[in-house]
Amino acid sequence: MLVRRTIEGLALVGWLGGQYLAAAFVGRAWTRPSRAWRRWLDGHGARLLIAYIRRHGALLIKIGQFIAMRPDLFPLAYVDACAPLRDQAPARPFAAIRAALDHIYEGRVDDHFAAIEPEALAAASFGQVHRARLHDGRTIALKVQYPGLAAVVRRDLFLARVSLRLFAIALPGWPFDQVYGEIARTSREEQDYLHEASAADRLRDGLKGQGVSVPEVLWEHTREKALAMEFAPGVTLAQLDAGALDGDERRRIADTVIDGFLHMLLDEGFFHADPHAGNLLYDRSVTPARLWLIDFGMTAAISPRESALYRRFLDRLRAHDTDGMVDVLIELGFVMPGVDRSRLKALAREVYDSVAHLTPKALKGSRRQFEIGAKINEFLRRIEGLAFPLHTLLLSRATSLIEGVCMELVPGSNLLDLVRPRLGRLTTLRGQVRN
C-alpha cells in the first residue's frame, strides 16, 4: 500500500511539475497562451490533487488543510479545492489498535484500562478514539495513534518536499523553505499527543468560568502516541437537531461559543484553531446544558502585542472603520513594504460594505458574492507583498468555523451582528485595566 501510494504520488508530482515548468518556459515568449494554460493547469491540477488526497489521507489531509489556509502562497484553484477537507477517515480494525496499545504501554494495557470498547467513537487521519473504562470505574476517551504512521508521514513529507522544489523552480521567488518548514513542524506536533495534552490543559485552565468545558487529561495513562482524557458526554453540534431547541437556547449556545473564543483570543492569548461543529459537544444531562470543546491537535498562541492589536481591530470594527482595520492588519504582518495600501484599503471598504449586513446564506451563490470574489482573486493575483502569518491563518480558519456553527444555530444572523454588541464591553473593560 505504501509503495503504491508513493508511486502514484511521484507520478502526480512529476506530471504537475513538468506541466508547470513547461508553462513557465512558454510564458517567457508567449504571455497570453501561457496564462490560459496556467489557468487550465491550476484547475485540473487541483482536481487531481484533491482526488489523491481523498484516496490516501494521513498527512495528505493536513497538507490539503494547510494549502486551504495559504492563498498568499498557492494558486487559488488549489485553495478552493482543499477548503472543504475535513480530517475524517474510516476506522481501523480494533485488532490493529490493540496491537498498537500493547506496544505503547509495553504489554501492560490491562494495568491501565479495565476495558476498551472495540468500536471507535471517531476516526481521523492520524488516529482514532475509543471509549474505555479505568479500574476505578471512570469512563474515559482514549485516542490512539495508528501504527506505522511515522513511516507514512516521512514518505508524504518526502513527496511534499519534491513537489515544493518543482513549484519553486517553476515559480521563482516562491518561499519553499517557509512552506515546507510549516508543514513539517505541524506534522511533528500532531504526532505528539503529549503536546496535544499540554494544549488541552492550557485551554482547560483558560476557559474556566466561561461556560465551555474542556476534558481533563489523565496524565498517568497518557503517552506520546496515546491520549487518555475525561469522557465528554453529549452529542456534537454537527449531530444536534438545532430545530428541536427553542430560539433562546440556540442563541445561548452561539453566545457561549463566541464569548469563549473571544476570551481565548483576547485574555489568554491561546486559542483552539479547529472549533468546527464536530469538536463541540452539547450535553443535556445537566441544567443548564453544558458545552464541551474537544480535539486539541490544532492550537495557536499569540503574543501580548498581537492580542492588543486584535483588541484595537475589534474597536475599529465596532466603529465601522475599515481603514483602521487595515492599518491593524498591516501591523500584524499581513502586508510587506511596497504594497499599494490605498488599493488594499479601497478593496477592504468595498468588501466590508458589501457583506457587513448580509447573512452568509443570503450572500452565498449570489451575484454579489461572485463579484466580490472576482475582485479579491484578481487583487491577490496582481499584488505582491501580501503575507499571512501562521497564527493569523489559524485565526481566520477558527473564525470561519465559528461563523458556520453560529449560522446553523441562529439562521439569518450575521457573525458581525452577533459579535458587535460585545465589542464595546470588551474594549472598555480592557481600557480600564490598562489605565
Image (spheres, helix red, strand yellow):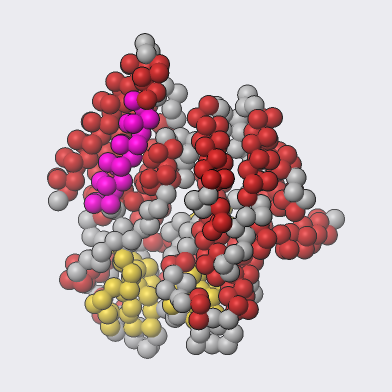
Which residue is more in the foreground, 85 or 227?
A: 85
| Vertical placement of residue 332 versus 83, above or below | above
421 sits to left or right of 84: right
Q: What residue lies at 19% left-to-right and 69% top-to-bottom?
A: 93
Query: Does the magenta portion include 41?
Result: yes
124 sits to left or right of 309: left
| Vertical placement of residue 86 versus 114, above or below | above
Image quadrant occupied by the C terminus: bottom right
Q: What residue lies at 63% left-to-right and 24% top-to-bottom?
A: 338
| Vertical placement of residue 413 versus 12, above or below | below
Residue 218, visible in the rendered structure: no
Residue 319: where, in percent of width, then height? 77, 50
Q: Residue furthest right?
A: 435
Stretch in magenta:
37-56
Q: Main secondary structure of the magenta part?
A: helix
Query: Does the magenta portion include 257?
Result: no
Residue 428, visible in the rendered structure: yes
